[in-house]
Image: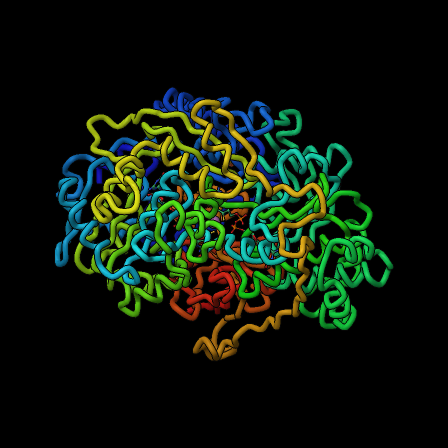
Amino acid sequence: MTERDRLDGDPAPSAVPPAHGSFLADESIPAPAVGGGLPIIEYWAEKTLSLQGPKIWQTLFHKSACLSCAWGTGGQNGGFINELEEPLQRCMKSVQAISSELQPGLGDHFFDRHTISELQALTSREADRLGRLSFPVIRQAGSDHYERVSWEEIYQLTAAGFSLPPQRIASYSSGRSSNEAAFLLQLMVRALGSNNLADCSDLCHAPSTVSLNKVFGTGTSLVSLESLRQADCVVLVGSNAPANHPRLMNELIELRDRGGKVLVINPVKEVGLAKFGSPAHPLRLVQGQEIASLFLQPIPGSDLALFVGIQKVLLERGWVQYDYLKAHTEHWQEVVDQVAATEWEAIVATCGLTLTEIVAAAELIHSSRNVVFAWAMGITHQANSVDNIYSIANTALMTGNVGKPGAGMMPIRGHSNVQGFGSMGVTAHLKDSIREALEKLLGKSLKREPGYDARALIEAADAGEVDTLLCLGGNLYAANPDLTQAKRALGNIDTIVYLATKPNQGHFHGLARQNTIIVPVYARFENPHKTTVESGNNFVRLNSPGKTHLKDADLVTEIDFLAELAHRVHGEDLIQWRRLHDTRYVRELIAQTIPGYEKIGAIDDTNAEFTIGGRILLEPKFPTPSGKAAMQPTPLPTLTLPTLEDFGLIPRHQPALVLALITGRSYGQHNTVVYKEADEYRGMPHRHCILMNPDDARKAGLGQHQRVSVRGDAGQLDNIEIIFGEVRSGAALMFYPEANVLMKARIEKRAGTPAYKRVPVAVFLR
Ligand SMILES: Nc1nc2c(c(=O)[nH]1)N[C@H]1C(S)=C(S)[C@@H](COP(=O)(O)OP(=O)(O)OC[C@H]3O[C@@H](n4cnc5c(=O)[nH]c(N)nc54)[C@H](O)[C@@H]3O)O[C@H]1N2
Ligand SMILES: Nc1nc2c(c(=O)[nH]1)N[C@H]1C(S)=C(S)[C@@H](COP(=O)(O)OP(=O)(O)OC[C@H]3O[C@@H](n4cnc5c(=O)[nH]c(N)nc54)[C@H](O)[C@@H]3O)O[C@H]1N2
Ligand code: SF4
Ligand SMILES: [Mo]
């Protein structure tokens, strides 16, 4: 397939895992002793000195926020500057993301030459490497081809789909688009009478939003970058920041340099969390800097028990800050009583750590003045994730570590504008204050019942209850658990419209019953409109207009597409929808309706990026009804695993064992999009590996590099290579999205989020 091969010298990998035994032991890659390090510089050099190099540099210096993660580098002061205006803040992942958007466009006849059946055989990486989507296409029922289609036809079909009963229309979105597009999307959908605004955050940090709102009355990070700099301890739970938020590693290095401590909690001993070499500290790039002062490896899904254990130590040693609890919190007595009543045996048995380890963690927190508690998917991708975050909050409150500089709760957000989507009201559960402001704007009362979140959307579609779906970015198909169900569910929807920059597996597997339309859009740095995004640190970035490298491409901006669609479905009703092509006007509406966003109304004149008001808490006064933090009791989870028989296997019949599988990312992928097959940092040479504890494997009669089958409750993957790594006994790790065929996933009911970590699987030799 020449379109793929021409993109670079790498032969495209086969869609099928290599045959049994074809990876010899000597082809495996030893895991390095340091995360980050020289490979980062090598990657920079390789990319920026390549033919694409000048364009990459130009884009890196463009005044727009990094595409990749929500740490939020870049913006008006140039591509390399963070919100404290410090230079040289750009990591390798931003280069990966830019380089992928700078690919050439698909050839005019690409879809004539390749059937959808053929495209369905592509891996994630192969699909991404086809190149940029550069003209609109449609696939109609019964056809095995996408075909070029006119804009008029697209608008007519989409507007017809959005004129159906509002409960049967929905959107899904992913946090790469702008605040302006997000605001417009939700305004259009809500004005129709639908609250079905599913978003990738439903699969990600929704439990953080739910629990932070409940306890503190605000759903985002309580800590600014400036405040983080004043911490003398960071507790980092369930995050692989060296791969997923690399610039956060510089903060941890600097914290250690000023004598601070880092407590890492993760069942996998991620090498970069033990030791990290950062290009920002060139003298220590190769040998690395110690990150974790203490590294604890609990049983997957048991963090809550560890935090209750830490609280019990605080209680038993008289280290609880009762004055703080009495003055600034509610329900503290209930929480303290519950901790006192929880037996040590239950705590230790649940989290699998020793009392000595738990005491060491409590001592570390107690002996620090200002502690920031930071977490990511290891905490949120659990069936009890809301309780998990409550247990972190309780620990922070018992030690007086919320509402002062240098301390607080810091969810580490994923996509570069996922938090902005939430702020703009793209959510199935809208806050009353925003609904009321929107009602005033539209002069119409809006529906109050929550809509479908991402999982509910798939379930509803599976039940035949959705007619029309608009996807603003993302890959709803591959991001979901149980890909068989996801495909079937999407196939029940009459019309699906995908707005995207690049093709992904969802465009080939997530086909609608009647019409599947792909609308090619501009990436952030090439968008002719001025736009804004919001970082995980609550900082609003302004993106200058740009130009695309794609010659003769027929792209549309997300704003223009949504404004035109809104005009077609609403006419001149309610507001002047066509005026919304002007993003300055959209920002005026945002300033009127979104709390904390008042300053965005003037940003076109001032170019002043800003921190959103009311979110960073430097005093223990909380935006809850009582002004106090509402502590929540946290029941210990019961962590059991099914037996081999439950998976239909006969014990002792063949080498086999049941494990708690963690599914997550390699540093060479961005979510469902794979850039690089190997994960050198974990010693995993390709995507079809399972990282296992050597003792677990040996006890079951399995060896390193052996090929096994992995079976979950939804499906099975064969020919998976065992790689030994520093994973806690009883746990294992595989990559998503490939692993999403395996599980149905339990759902955290209060947040709708699937438990992608701690997935029960059987690993066996066929
Ligand atoms: N390079 C890169 N960067 C990204 C992304 C990407 O795909 N690639 N994606 C972006 C997005 S959308 C997100 S949400 C973030 C994700 O960022 P992370 O949350 O760091 O990503 P995950 O790979 O899901 O891994 C989470 C970590 O949790 C650990 N873990 C698993 N189970 C448990 C548990 O029970 N307890 C504890 N304490 N830890 C556990 C895993 O071992 C792993 O180290 O990254 C963002 N940035
Ligand atoms: N098993 C398992 N499953 C998981 C996870 C896990 O850890 N384990 N993580 C979950 C998490 S945290 C998340 S956030 C989801 C991610 O789910 P999604 O956000 O749905 O998926 P992405 O892979 O980030 O979407 C990538 C696509 O977005 C499109 N895109 C990129 N930039 C733009 C743009 O500017 N505009 C538009 N319109 N489109 C653009 C491109 O076409 C690209 O192919 O996956 C979830 N699924
Ligand atoms: S840390 Fe995140 S925002 Fe900063 S440059 Fe890297 S990927 Fe971009
Ligand atoms: Mo995410």
* Colour style of the rendered protein structure: rainbow
Question: Horizontal placement of 400 versus 497: left or right?
Answer: right
Q: Residue at x 38, y 20 (%)?
A: 54
Q: Residue at x 16, y 35 (%)?
A: 108
Question: Horizontal placement of 340 versus 469: left or right?
Answer: right
561 in relation to 764, above or below: above
Q: Position of residue 456 (x, y in %)?
A: 39, 64
Q: Position of residue 637 (x, y in %)?
A: 62, 70
Q: How many marks?
A: 0
Q: Residue at x 15, y 50 (%)?
A: 145
Q: Quadrant of the C terminus?
A: bottom left
Task: In this rendered view, identify the residue nearer to me: 601 or 699.
Answer: 601
Question: Image quarter for residue 105?
Answer: top left
Task: In this rendered view, identify the residue nearer to me: 183 or 739.
Answer: 183
Can residue 686 be seen here? The reply is no
645 in relation to 283, above or below: below
Q: Residue at x 43, y 49 (%)?
A: 425
Task: In this rendered view, identify the residue nearer to me: 202 or 530.
Answer: 530
Question: Horizontal placement of 665 versus 626: left or right?
Answer: left
Can residue 73 be seen here? The reply is yes
Q: Quadrant of the N terminus?
A: top left
Q: Position of residue 41 (x, y in %)?
A: 52, 28
Q: Position of residue 635 (x, y in %)?
A: 65, 70
